[in-house]
Amino acid sequence: MSRPSEFELIARFFAPLAKAAPGAFGLTDDAAILRPSAGEELVVTADALVEGVHFLRDDPAETVARKALRVNLSDLAAKGAKPLGYLLVLALPDWPGTDWLAAFAKGLAEDQRKYGFVLHGGDTTATPGPLCIAVTAFGTVPAGQMLRRAGARPGDLAFVSGGIGGGGGGVQILKNNRPGIPPEIADELVRRYRLPEPRLALGAKLRGLASAALDVSDGLIADLGHIAEVSGVHIAVEAARVPLVAGLKELWAGEAVAKAVTAGDDYEIAFTAPASARAQILEAARQSATPVTEIGRVEEGEGIALMDASGREIPLPRQGYTHF
Amino acid sequence: MSRPSEFELIARFFAPLAKAAPGAFGLTDDAAILRPSAGEELVVTADALVEGVHFLRDDPAETVARKALRVNLSDLAAKGAKPLGYLLVLALPDWPGTDWLAAFAKGLAEDQRKYGFVLHGGDTTATPGPLCIAVTAFGTVPAGQMLRRAGARPGDLAFVSGGIGGGGGGVQILKNNRPGIPPEIADELVRRYRLPEPRLALGAKLRGLASAALDVSDGLIADLGHIAEVSGVHIAVEAARVPLVAGLKELWAGEAVAKAVTAGDDYEIAFTAPASARAQILEAARQSATPVTEIGRVEEGEGIALMDASGREIPLPRQGYTHF
């Protein structure tokens, strides 16, 4: 195996990624300094990817790196935060060699440029087990304006950005080949699994408009269920309005909606807002060039339900993805 | 295996640890808010522990938890920072059951109380591999006063807190039984391996006094070598002055100093300071009830050397611990 030493790895691949951050000290110190501007608060979140759980060893190293950043950027987006920087913890088994690490660093560099996000530090260690990538992301919001999960009120509408089910469809295609799906549609599903699109522009515009928001990682129903739970309300989602990604009806036939809303890995923003804000929401969607669909309503009560066209609840075998 | 679900795990074991932090929202949101006070900067650092690399499966869950916090608190200490909070990423294999997790959370709670450190969030995921614990720690310093690795100048003195070699001695005893070491000394070495003591009180007093500082994790020689490298100086350490932990001469005989200064896992603060600050350093040591030993001097040149009593360099097979 060809692999640089721990310190060569940092100097060669990671230090260049920290150049734009004065508080990262070129990754030559034990810690970094973060300085939110006056009137800003720091939003912090962490999400890890584990080989065999969140990505496959055969996935391109560049997209693994970008997904590790994007699942965290998606959390910042859903909170209305502007990306600032991140720490990267890598537990490295033997198998990633120099080529893999170079491609991984290239993927990080690409999304740093794309999202204005800068490496500030981290830790690199050996592991006998699967590759584990933990990213802690920092963003900023004007003080007091972080979008919360708590805050949905009866009478509010429920919305979601982009399309639902693409991540789940993509992982199924990677695991089970492509059962009669046109290649260009299958490729697009795989792309959505590997490279979710953090909705940062939309998230920033939802500050002060949305009453509650989160990103869809466990599954649309499970995640809106989290909003319902901490807000103390019921949310009814109309199955016919859920914006399914193209190709899922071919992949999952009659189960397409039920599978898409419980599959997870979408990294869209699900949010609620007062009905009076509907026009402003649609304007925010237009300005941020992000599709937004109204999918349901917030009611008195508790829990989450997927409703058919005649107003009956569609039973779901599970609400979403859980790790254990 | 008896194990709570992902959400039960968070609600039952981790949410209580976040109560004291308003910005953690009871772990019911995707992100936390950090608000350094006016005039303060945020110091951020991350360190991971991997089962089989940094701790052993048989180690008590409580000390594993406390070590995961302490290796990070030690970085904050060496930077002169005051602990504020942390994010915890857990990649959990099948084997830790409810009892293990309860003891792990108890260990976290204990050190939270001891060090004024509060859980702010994180991520929990399944893994097929070894248990992986990544902590991102946040602390605060008055703006511009973080202790750096860069800053040692020729003429400065080199110091270290506490005792060196205890972590390396402890891990050897755990792996190879106890070759003729009195049990109470062996137990103390194991305790130092499992529960290093972050030198927070000393670190805070070194702000404005030390010219460079870091914590000893890779090994005293390797870590002072990092200071020498980024400061552009040479550091000469006198072997006879290195404060060896008791029992290492029995464990390692004639190799005790060479092994102790390259073993790592000490989590003491190694630092440099102008000779004119010697009296203030000793006063800071007294006030913080932390032993501090002068062990060498900073000179023109580069690199690090361990010197014998006659001023000759002692050759070392390696400078410290590296992961790969």
Image (cartoon, coloured by chain):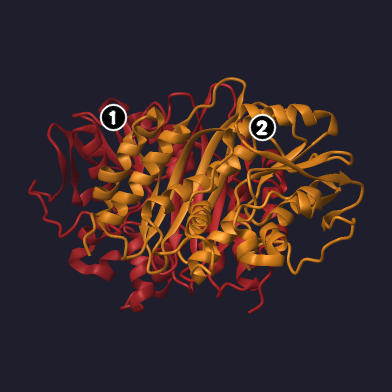
Chain colours: A red, B orange
> How far apart are the alpha carbons under marks 2 and 1?
50 Å
Q: Position of residue B192 (x, y in %)?
A: 53, 52
Residue for point 84% across, 44% down: B297
Please tell me whether mark 2 or mark 1 is closer to you in this view.
Answer: 2
Residue that badge 1 annotates = A151
Q: Between residues A218 and B91, which one lies in front from this camera angle?
A: B91
**Type of amino acid at the residue the image marks with label 2:** Ala
* Observer able to see residue A266: no
Q: Mark 2 lies on which chain?
A: B
Pointer 2 local density, CA inside 10 Å: few below 14, some 14–19, many at least 20: many
Q: Which chain carries label 1?
A: A
Q: Vertically, is A209 above or below A30?
A: above
Q: Between residues B109 and B133, which one lies in front from this camera angle?
A: B109
Pointer 1 local density, CA inside 10 Å: few below 14, some 14–19, many at least 20: many
Mark drawn on residue B285: 2
Residue for point 26% across, 31% down: A152
